[in-house]
């Protein structure tokens, strides 16, 4: 077995076909996580009875356990739940017809929701309480103040964390290979083992992930610069 | 795919079985953190002291190891390192897998550690070094006695996150066939088909360790930051004051995973 | 004795110091005055090499350093022969008042810990902080912190103590206690170079006053002389702006 530099390129091209799957998983889980996470964050901020403490426990548990355990628990636990439900409600739907990727999406959304709730929470925390008071002082209602004053500032503050979590989910999507979803990592495995060129295939996969990560960082950086214009301080 | 019916008895049965491999998991974590700290320092120094060429190398190193998934890195080093070493006529075919795993986690953690060290050092006020110089300390003395202890205290929360992230990342070592906890869980289920029980136990063990580590680090942090006691007390008083406001309600916790993808 | 000769300093293309000569004899208190941006703080920081002078010569206690090619060792020696009190105190945040004072004695002077502790406690006592030995900087007021800063410098028994606007970061009501301490140690015959905006203090305590503007020494001499009858127009204007009463005493 000899190092074959030209195969890195071959593998790279082959892997590109799996990029959409990786991005799809990432986007869906981040978006789902953001929605769920915001709800969780609000439950905790407003100390909603019952839901507040449950949210706290949920976030601690998800953040304290590896992402792969979430995936496996969903993959192996969800079918039983679905089948049980179907049977008791008389549906004809069976868990066998759930596509593999759905398990990954559900599991990763759960993972993302815990991290996103922390992103949202700390973003809101970063907004000075004086801002809310100032909004009230000019007669805004609380929802108005939140929407027009607090959220935009919170988003600006949360952006670096958001981009970090996004990258985390992008990298985490490689776990989907364990439930037979062919994303970049799984594709690399296939390309590697059919050609018996492991190093080259994974190198190509690494390059793709590296590129995507740098791209996300750049985009977040540019966005941050744009919305943080007001934050620059100084006199200029 | 649907396994056997959920049976609580298996949960109790699996606990000791999985715990028997805890030492492997903790060994990987421990070694990786210690080595990663070393790597982190080596990588951070050229950037802290702005050494021409080496600074650029450090940047690329950090970017790569932060920019690619740990799983890919595991495969890359496991398959790639032997081939590269073969070019130098070093045969590592008999080297245990665990070595590759620890190496990967160390290099991975090292990239995050170097960022942590950089941020920590940058957070120490320039006046501290000047004061150290003014009493006659040398550069290394000022760094070791004045900057480092303060930087470490500042970095502790990030370090805690990194340790916990590494712990969780070790769950991927099974993909190279290492018998740590997650690998063990997989062998258990092939025997009994009790998937959910096995992974539930697995998750609980990880959670308990993460939780304990977090508590431990928080205690340590409180100790290391005791010189800022009064400031913290003041801040808390401010947070609790008055009617429930957004900031007040949020003030107590909310520490984010500032380093490590940690998923 | 401290002697600076022909000190110049550039920041990029900008020349901040344009050839400064300054001498402070043993036990003398030299006050450096001047508008902000005149280069007085830079000059002070050149003495212990927190800023690297572009050219000139620094001499402390018979040890002379050519600023063009100083070795690390020479810089080290200059710093060991001097001590500095900073505008923003710069106390070591992770150390108590006592440890702050001990640090230089133990690490630089290599004193045994017990001896260093004893000496440090004594000096802290002298600046009126005998009851605050174990307090961290964050638990002290600005005035107390600055007194620890003075104690830290004093304990090293340097040839000269450099004061960089020691009271300008303090709340007005805390200025008095710090000036009082400096006044007291000035009487003990410790050589001091003080950059300050406190005109009253300079007039009362300094033996020699230097007025700087745009990187040059505009005027220098006996404080009573300079405050009463400034020869240069720029000095006159500065004094008028800073201390309105000065115009009456003419």
Image (cartoon, rainbow, N blue to C red):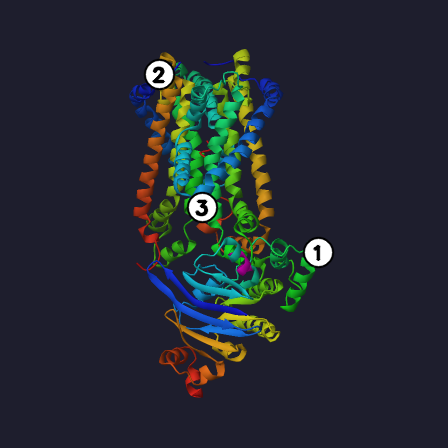
Chain letter of disc 1? C
Give the position of the N terminus of chain C as an image quadrant. bottom right
Q: Label 1: which residue?
A: C114
Neighbour tally class for label 3: few under 14, some 14-19, many 20 plus, Cα within 10 Å:
few
Span highlighted in magenta in the image: C75-79
Few, some or many residues within 10 Å of mark 1 (<14, 14–19, 20+): few
Viewer-side residue, A155 vs B213: B213
> Which SS type dominates the magenta stretch?
helix
Instruction: Determine which of the numbered discs, if any, sits on residue A191 in the image.
Output: 2
Query: Label 2 is found on which chain of the structure?
Result: A
Q: Nearer the viewer, mark 3 or mark 2?
A: 3
Taking the image as shown, residue A142 lies to the left or right of residue B173, namely left
In the shown orientation, is residue A12 left or right of residue B226?
left
In the figure, residue A6 lies in which quadrant?
top left
Task: State which quarter of the image contains the C terminus of chain C.
Answer: bottom left
In the rendered image, the vertical position of residue B168 relative to residue C130, given as above or below: above
Residue marked by disc 3: B49
Label 2 – label 1 distance at C-alpha = 70 Å
Element marked by disc 2: helix
Residues at discs 3 and 2 in contact (Cβ within 8 Å): no
Residue A206, given in percent of the width and then of the height, sits at 37, 26
Q: CA distance from mark 3 to mark 1?
A: 36 Å
Q: Is residue A15 above or below residue A35?
A: above
Q: Secondary structure at mark 3?
A: loop
- Horizontal and vertical percent for residue A73? 48, 23
Whole-Å distance between the Cαs marked 3 and 2? Answer: 43 Å
Q: Residue under mark 3: which chain is it in?
A: B
Instruction: Give yes or no for residue B235 being in the magenta stretch.
Output: no
* 2 or 1: mark nearer the eye: 1
């Amino acid at each position: 077995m000899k190092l074959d530099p030209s195969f890195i390129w071959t593998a790279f091209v082959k892997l590109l076909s799996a990029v959409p799957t990786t991005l799809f998983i990432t986007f869906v889980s981040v978006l789902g996580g953001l929605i769920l996470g915001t709800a969780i964050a609000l439950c905790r901020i407003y100390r909603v009875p019952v839901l507040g403490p449950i949210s706290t426990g949920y976030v601690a548990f998800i953040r304290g356990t590896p992402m792969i355990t979430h995936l496996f628990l969903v993959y192996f636990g969800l079918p039983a739940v679905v089948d049980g439900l179907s049977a008791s409600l008389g549906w004809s739907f069976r868990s066998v017809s759930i596509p593999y990727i759905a398990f990954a999406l559900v599991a990763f959304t759960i993972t993302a929701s815990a991290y996103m709730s922390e992103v949202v929470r700390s973003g809101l925390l970063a907004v000075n309480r004086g801002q809310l008071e100032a909004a009230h002082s000019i007669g805004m209602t609380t929802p108005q103040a939140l929407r027009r004053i607090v959220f935009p500032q919170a988003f600006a503050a949360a952006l670096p964390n958001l981009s970090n979590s996004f990258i985390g989910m992008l990298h985490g999507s490689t776990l989907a290979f364990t439930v037979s979803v062919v994303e970049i990592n799984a594709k690399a495995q296939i390309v590697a083992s059919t050609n018996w060129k492991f190093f080259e295939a994974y190198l190509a996969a690494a390059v793709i992930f590296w590129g995507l990560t740098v791209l996300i960082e750049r985009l977040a950086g540019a966005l941050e610069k744009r919305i943080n214009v007001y934050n620059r301080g100084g006199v200029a | 795919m649907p396994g056997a019916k959920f049976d609580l008895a298996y949960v109790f049965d699996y606990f000791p079985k999985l715990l028997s491999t805890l030492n492997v998991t903790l060994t990987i974590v421990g070694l990786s953190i210690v080595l990663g700290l070393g790597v982190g320092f080596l990588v951070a120094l050229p950037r802290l002291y702005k050494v021409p060429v080496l600074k650029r190398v450090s940047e690329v190193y950090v970017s790569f190891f932060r920019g690619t998934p740990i799983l890919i890195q595991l495969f890359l080093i496991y398959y790639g390192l032997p081939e590269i070493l073969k070019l130098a006529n070093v045969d590592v075919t008999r080297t245990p897998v665990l070595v590759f795993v620890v190496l990967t986690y160390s290099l991975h953690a090292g990239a995050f550690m170097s960022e942590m060290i950089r941020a920590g050092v940058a957070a120490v006020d320039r006046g501290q070094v000047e004061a150290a110089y003014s009493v006659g300390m040398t550069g290394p003395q000022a760094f070791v006695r004045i900057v480092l202890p303060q930087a470490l205290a500042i970095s502790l929360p990030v370090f805690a996150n990194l340790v916990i992230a590494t712990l969780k990342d070790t769950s991927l070592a099974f993909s190279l066939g290492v018998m740590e906890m997650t690998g063990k869980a997989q062998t258990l289920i092939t025997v009994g088909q009790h998937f959910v029980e096995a992974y539930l136990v697995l998750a609980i063990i990880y959670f308990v360790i993460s939780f304990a580590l977090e508590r431990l680090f928080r205690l340590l942090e409180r100790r290391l930051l005791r010189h800022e006691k009064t400031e913290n007390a003041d801040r808390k008083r401010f947070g609790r004051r008055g009617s429930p406001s957004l900031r007040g309600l949020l003030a107590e916790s909310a520490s984010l995973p500032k380093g490590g993808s940690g998923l | 004795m401290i002697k600076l000769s022909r000190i110049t300093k550039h920041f990029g293309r900008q020349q901040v110091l344009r050839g400064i000569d300054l001498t402070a004899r043993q036990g003398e208190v030299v006050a450096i005055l001047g508008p902000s941006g005149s280069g007085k703080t830079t000059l002070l920081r050149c003495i212990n090499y927190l800023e690297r002078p572009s050219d000139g010569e620094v001499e402390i206690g018979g040890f002379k350093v050519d600023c063009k090619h100083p070795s690390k060792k020479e810089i080290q020696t200059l710093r060991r022969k001097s001590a500095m009190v900073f505008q923003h105190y710069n106390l070591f945040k992770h150390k108590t008042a006592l440890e702050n004072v001990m640090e230089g004695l133990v690490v630089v002077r290599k004193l045994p810990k017990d001896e260093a502790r004893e000496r440090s406690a004594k000096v802290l006592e002298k600046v009126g902080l005998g009851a605050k030995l174990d307090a961290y900087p964050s638990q002290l007021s600005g005035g107390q912190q600055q007194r620890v800063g003075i104690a830290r410098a004093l304990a090293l028994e340097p040839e000269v103590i450099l004061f960089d606007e020691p009271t300008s970061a303090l709340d007005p009501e805390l200025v008095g206690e710090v000036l009082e301490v400096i006044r007291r140690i000035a009487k003990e015959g410790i050589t001091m170079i003080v950059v300050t905006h406190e005109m009253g203090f300079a007039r009362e305590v300094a033996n020699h006053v230097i007025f700087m503007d745009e990187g040059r020494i505009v005027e220098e001499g006996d404080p009573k002389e300079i405050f009463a009858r400034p020869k240069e127009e720029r000095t006159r204007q500065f004094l008028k702006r800073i201390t309105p009463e000065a115009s009456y005493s003419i």
